[in-house]
Image: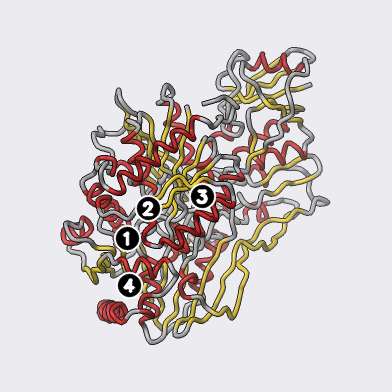
Amino acid sequence: MKQLLILSGKGGTGKTTVASAFITMSKGRAFADCDVDAPNLHLVMSQLSEPAKTDYYGFGKAVIDQEKCTRCGLCEENCSFGAIKDFSIGEFECEGCGVCLEICPVQAITMLDHISGDMMLYKNDERVFSTAQLKMGSGASGKLVTAVKQQLIQEASDSDLAIIDGSPGIGCPVIASINGVDFVLIVAEPTISGMHDMKRIIETSKHFGVPCAVCINKFDVNADTANEIESYCNGLLVSVVGRIPYDETVVKAVNNCQSIASYPESPAGKAIGLIWERILNDLVSVKNREGENL
Amino acid sequence: MKLAAPVESKSLDAPICPSFGRTPYYALYDTETGNHEFLDNSAAASQGGAGIKAAQMLVDHGAEAIITCRCGDNAAQVLNAAKVAMYKAQDGTVTDNIEKLKNGGLSHLSEIHPGLHNHGGVKE
Amino acid sequence: MKIAVLSGKGGTGKTFVSVNLACAADKAVYVDCDVEEPNGHLFLKPEITEKQSVAVTVPEADMSKCTGCRKCVDFCKYNALALLRDRLMIFYEVCHSCGGCILFCPEKALSKKQREIGTIETGVSDNVTVLTGCLNTGEVSGVPIIKELMEKLPEKDTVVIDCPPGSSCIVMESIREADYCILVAEPTLFGAHNLGMVYELVKLFNKPFGVVLNKCLPGENPSEKFCRGNKINILAEIPYDENLGRLNSKGLVAVRESGQYHELFRTLLYKVAKEALQ
């Protein structure tokens, strides 16, 4: 199975717009949304049945048994996270380190399993869609991202191609997204911060030895910066596979729970269609991690 | 020599598991006696630092060489410090790979990937 | 008055609103809590007056005292320690600085060491004091930087806190000191969906709040619908404006370039002040 990952660095550049379009155009049978903090892909993937949900356990949370507690205050004194006040442990502040459990002279504290998110699997005869949602207050988790991808690989093992809508940002969830994929498409926006984040993602992809390409979204908002991006990429021998114009049809499509691919004649629809053709060609020539031709 | 390999099920005829830190089991094989055992990988359930914990466990069990598809930065540091050799696994079962290693057919693992910093529940 | 600006996802205009709000005030402090990717400074271009290192406590081993009991390795929930015959390996990027290993070593072989995870830069941009938190690449958590930033907030001035996107624990730290929260939402289904998440967050923390609808287009606005449905106060509706897009992409601050936007943000500031004081 070849894995195509779509990343952007900062949010709002159009990752999900592009990913959803690719999935629609490829009649994708296997796809995943790794933006576990704020998953959006399911909103534009129509005909989704009820998902099978699995609890995702994060670090445990400590709890004080008020009946055993002698109010010595040792736990509060030694908590590095400031999670304990008035002999009660804050659910959001506790990082499950276990110091308070160990230090309590009367063993009044226990560690409880804590569900920090839900994994979701939408599966029918035609397609497999893997995603997850972190609960509020949890940290965006590299492990959950990995679990979402693994769920996809397991459940869609007979598919040739998996399209993954990646995590925003540049931190650990992004690194977890990149691990094991065959190709990264970076959606860049022609702004100073957009370019800044694109650079960091290119760096990360190269660090992992994963081939990457860039497409510029809403390029006409600042054609100068768009050109700068192209020069920069050319200098690094990173292909710029296309430019997408700002197009209100995108908003219309999203609000109708559709991908922009449902409007193939729109400016954005056409541009993304061309990019998709380009990517398909690039993917064919990429060898996967085991050195086999895809 | 004591070899270890991550394996998906408790059988030497099982394929080598693609993940090092989060494999469900390790096969431990003694090339001199032919004896072998399977270890449950408690590191798999860890929120983070699975590779480190797994490497520690294998070192504790006296592993002198590992056959694996890939290995993360942190685990590799532990293994290197303990002078445990790392070999790149090829397609096939654990038995196949052990045979290849005996015949000098396996190369050293040179590609160490950066750690995945997988930690659950806490900020990225 | 401390105003936190947040949104469910990136790209909605948090930094745009925060930066312009701070610049529209007579005098304000702008705090960039998006420590992984701080962007405010790209627009404000502050003259830096101070750079401070933010450090966390990590363990350091004195092997001459170590008996190999493994209590530290077994205790660590993050698997940050590995004990080989003659040395204890410490993996800093996995360590959460809980201090447990140091505390529980029976031989007191572990001691505290400071390790930098990021920086805070203080600077000035005309009428705005700029505090920028920045997390070093690859680090575990930006929370210690936020905590340090919150310590530096002045008591009396107008403070605008530019929060990280989402609703994770780092966002919670960023809004802790806020007197009022502005939720920024874009007019799409995604925007409304993610607005829902931060709406839950501010309610949980009992913060007074209002919504700014950004990049508004003609036609139905799902975020507006969400607000009306939940009786949420809409503070401003900023239409999508190509010119604004251009200013933004050049790193220019709208209220400093355009009378129209200066007026818009003065009005917003006034409204927020009124709401916050109620």
Callout 3: helix, strand or loop? loop
Residue A97 vertical placement versus C256 (above, below): above
Could you say which disc has been placed on residue A96 in the image? 3
Q: CA distance from mark 4 to mark 1?
A: 14 Å
Q: Amino acid at mark 2?
A: Met
**Dot 4, how many residues are within 10 Å of its Cα: few (below 14), some (14-19), or many (20+)?**
many
Residue C255 vs residue A243, the one in the foreground:
A243
Residue A174 image point, x, y percent: 50, 47
Q: Amino acid at mark 3?
A: Gly
Res. C152 visible in picture: yes
Residue at image location 56% in from the left, 61% down from the top:
C135
Q: Which residue is mark 2?
A: A136
Give the quadrant of residue C8: bottom left
Q: Which residue is mark 4?
A: C180
Q: Amino acid at mark 4?
A: Tyr
* Chain identifier of the residue bearing label 3 in the image: A
Q: Are marks 4 and 1 on the same chain?
A: yes
Callout 1: helix, strand or loop? helix
Q: Which of the two discs, 1 and 3, sits closer to the camera?
A: 1
Res. A111 visible in picture: no
Q: Which of the two discs, 4 and 3, sits closer to the camera?
A: 4
Give the quadrant of residue A119: top left
A91 displayed left or right of A198: left
Q: Which of the two discs, 1 and 2, sits closer to the camera?
A: 2
Q: Which residue is mark 1?
A: C204
Label 1–label 2 contact, CB within 8 A: yes
Q: Earlier in the sequence, mark 2 or mark 3?
A: 3
**Dot 2, how many residues are within 10 Å of its Cα: few (below 14), some (14-19), or many (20+)?**
many
Label 1–label 3 contact, CB within 8 A: no
Residue at image location 72% in from the left, 32% down from the top:
B60
